[in-house]
Image (cartoon, rainbow, N blue to C red):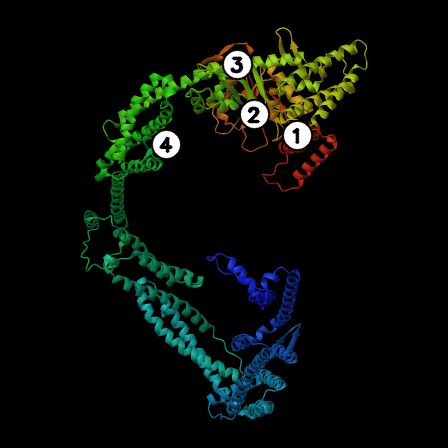
Amino acid sequence: MTTAGGQGGNDFETSSAIIPTNPKHSATTASSSSTQEAEHIYTFYDDVKFIPDIHEIAASAQNVVQNTIANMKKFLLKFRDFKHLWRSDKLAAVEKFFAKHPSLGAFDEEVTKYQKNLDELTAMNRLKDFDFMQLNLHSFLNDLTTHARETINMFNRFLADEARARLFELRDKLDEYEKNLKLSTDTLEDLKFVLRTIAEIQSQSDLIEAKANNVKDKYNLLESYHYKVTDEERAILQSLKRRWDEIFLNSKHRDVNLKRVKSRFTEITLIQLDRLRKSIIAFAEKFAKFGPGSIKTADELSQGLKLMKIYRDELTKIEAEKQELTNAEKLFNLPISSYPELYVVQKEMKNLEKLYQLYESQIKARQVWSETLWRDLDVQLLVDGIENFIKELKKMPREVKGMPLAKLIETGMKEFRESLPLMLDLKNEALRERHWRTLMKETSIEFDMNPESFTLENLFQMNLQRFNDVIQNIVTSATKELQIEKGVREVVDAWEKVKFNVVKYVKGNQDRGYVLGACDEVLQQLDDHTMALQGMAGSRYIGPFLKTVQEWEKSLSHIAEVIELWINVQRKWTYLEGIFVSGDIRSQLPEEAKKFDEKNKLFKSIMADTYRDPLIKKQCHVPSRLPDLESIFVGLERCQKSLNDYLDSKRNAFPRFFFISDDELLSILGSAEPSAIQEHMIKMFDNIASLRLIKVSDTLTQAQAMISAEKEEMQFKQNVVTEGRVEDWMTKVLEEMRRTNRLITKEAVYYYRFRKTRTSWMYNYQGMVVLAANQIWWSWEVEDTFNKVAKGQKMAMKNYAKQLNAQIEEVVAEIRNPLASNDRKKFNTVLIIDVHAKDIIDAFVRDSILDAREFEWESQLRFYWVNEPDELMIRQCTGEFGYGYEYMGLNGRLVITPLTDRIYLTITQALSMYLGCAPAGPAGTGKTESVKDLAKALGILCVVTNCGEGMDSLAIGKNLNGLCQSGAWGCFDEFNRIDASVLSVISSQLKTIQQGLITKAKRFVFEGVEIDLDSRVGAFITMNPGYAGRTELPESIKALFRPVVVIVPDLQQICEIMLFSEGFSLAKMLAKKMVVLYKLSREQLSKQYHYDFGLRALKSVLVMAGELK
């Protein structure tokens, strides 16, 4: 219907496409067309399709049709309320309803529901108009009303059937009562029957009346539904109450008439009761003395079974007589007699029956088991069977389990159970003919071992539990011997098949021969089998297998030795092979290369032989295998020692090689091209991405400049020729870097504000040069201000503070202009330092600090260009340090807060006393960054090492070696994660360095080797005591470092200065809002590990804000 409606709007356009227009026009067009093209017939569609009004009319028609269909669907939805009428199986639904035995109220409610549906459907109109459409519901509503009527009729039929059944049941019951009341009472039995009938009528009066009323209610309900019932049913229903009243009255009359007969029979009953009591007492005495419970031994249990039957029969007769007389007592209204002696016998008889039934069951089970042949023995079946009998006995009541008979039965079953493990032992596959002969000799009993006739009956009669120790010893020996035999066989079979996993060794695209694959499983198997053989050899049952076990112990020990050596040789070979294959290394170490070639040839020969036949046992027992591998190992050890000595010589020549790995150093040494150094520059110099190398000729290359990660360059004053050994020309590069940096810094100091503004001057120099020169002039200007104050210019300090503010405003104004990325970073960094300088002067003004000898000035980092020795010197309190001239590009600087100042002062004072410094505090407070920032301020390289549990003293020693010779600072982050055993070694290394610094030695012995000592070296450790798994530092370490506690930094001040440096004029307000935002985020948001609202994250956002601005 929907599809038709959607399509209708397009019918006009479609039909217009089949009505042709002027035939002449068509003919003319066709004749002008190519004969190969199909003739095109023009229709009205070509004209109609361009008329907008027609398209609008078609769309409107389509909308009307769709709205009409939607209204029709909405109308039809209300028929969902009647869906229960057309379900497929109405009979099943009605049967399910009646299966719940509903009350008449529930039934009436259900039928009324269907009647209501019927009335609604009957009242509905058969035709329904929807705009231009008419819906005919005649057939549909007729079907629904038919379903409703059928369902109502079905409910009525079920109720009628139920009412009829209950009515006829009542009628039959009343007929039975009338018949029984009329019986004669000539005998005692007849009298009892009539009296029982009278008693039943009297007691059932209310129940009969209730049933009659219920039936009547059902018929009344059917009548309300106009359901027709038969005349017979109507007659029976109307006579029910009258008949019941008559029967009840007749029972009363009959009971009165029987009084005389009841008196006579009462006297007879009393006599019988006295006789029964005497017989019960006699039976109880006999039962106690001679009954089935009097059995004393296990052999008498069979006789007890017979006694059970005799006494059970006699007891049954007494119980029947007793029951008959009890019924008579009830009928004649006599007091009910009790028989305590009978109750005792009944109770004991019941308990004995349980025990004898259990005994008889297990005896029958044993008889079945005894017929089983020995070869077919299933011991578990016997064990489960007897265990079930024992469990059954244990589950019996306590009074039953406490009877002497129960103890006898339990003892017999337990003895049988004890013999079963011995049968299982004798069934053991380990028993050989020699073991059976030993058993016969020990027990002096001959066995008929013919498998066709040997049944379990023979073993049951033997009572095997008597020979428990003998059997256990024999079976244990046989079992242990079999275990050893199987164990030896398993080892022998395994090592006749186990093979090496030999794989191709491919490096790059070159096939370098063969190597052993993973040997973990083989080594584990070796270890397991060796332990197993050792265990066998220590057994007292080893006798028949001693010689074999000893031979295989020796063989496996040899295999283990060979494989372990083989793996070590292969490990060294794979390392050295990749090095000595390179032509450049071979040319530099010709003797070692020659030695390696000799061992390489032998190793490849061994591996080729192993590839052809990889059986481990065979290869490891080749007579020359172990000596050959030992020879290769010793040779490779010498090659590696020579290589390490060679690398150490290169590192000692250029100490910054200590900061790269062996492989990285080899890649540099192994290449004749100077460009090989480029990718490793960033590890040897702080923030230096590369050198600018210029090819002067085919054979000559020169280093012209250093390029930072931000692409800032420092042009060398004199180009460095990159020829000869790399360590030599890299040393020249380092020296030229420092020389150039010193000269540029000196020039920048000289031309500071010379004929140009300060900001214009900054464009001419590198970022760190500008910072150093600025700080030199700031230190001079402050001290000059102190001199002016001393000469009487009281406002000098305030005037200088205004001057600093003007300088800052000048830089901020420059930042707001369009700048190159590197220039913006330079100005940002300068502004951070300028703000700190201004804060210091503001504090001097506030606190009236007017003398250069005041601690507040002495405690600041002060930069001086000292004419003698014509160097930049940095002073703080008692510490004086030469500037390092380490070029670091635009590496950025930290915002300096009072916390930062305190850390700087602690570090410089520690260095002046030849100590290290140990900042400690939570993560994200700036411990490591503060150390790195002070190194930047002093122009010194700072190498950060992340410490962990796996770090050893060798790695730390290598690092310290490089620091000492290069004069760099080393910051060991999370130092307290290192294992305590390693810390003691590190403390001795640090103590050695400290002694060298105290004695001002130029060279000193470090770990057995004499090396250079640069006095600028510094060692620092950072710690986060709050984390789990941290090691408590030994006192020997603590004594070498001055501690400083790093608390939560002043976030607002840092934010304010950073925003200010990025050119934000409302920095103070923005900083306050940012800090509050991050504080709320940290406190209110979920505490998930990947959420970070600390200083690092905050700084990243501020830097991004500056870039976006």
Label 2 neighbourhood size at 10 Å, few (<14), some (14-19), many (20+)? some
| Between discs 3 and 1, the one toward the N terminus | 3
Structural distance between the alpha carbons of marks 3 and 2: 21 Å
Q: How many marks?
A: 4
| Between discs 3 and 2, the one toward the N terminus | 2
Tell us which disc is closer to us: 1 or 2.
2
Structural distance between the alpha carbons of marks 2 and 4: 34 Å
In this rendering, position of residue 132 left or right of residue 627? right
| Between discs 1 and 2, the one toward the N terminus | 2
Q: Which residue is mark 4?
A: 509
Q: Which residue is mark 2?
A: 709
Q: Is residue 485 visible?
A: yes
Q: Quadrant of residue 134?
A: bottom right
Structural distance between the alpha carbons of marks 3 and 1: 47 Å
- Secondary structure beneath dot 3 equals strand
| Between discs 3 and 4, the one toward the N terminus | 4
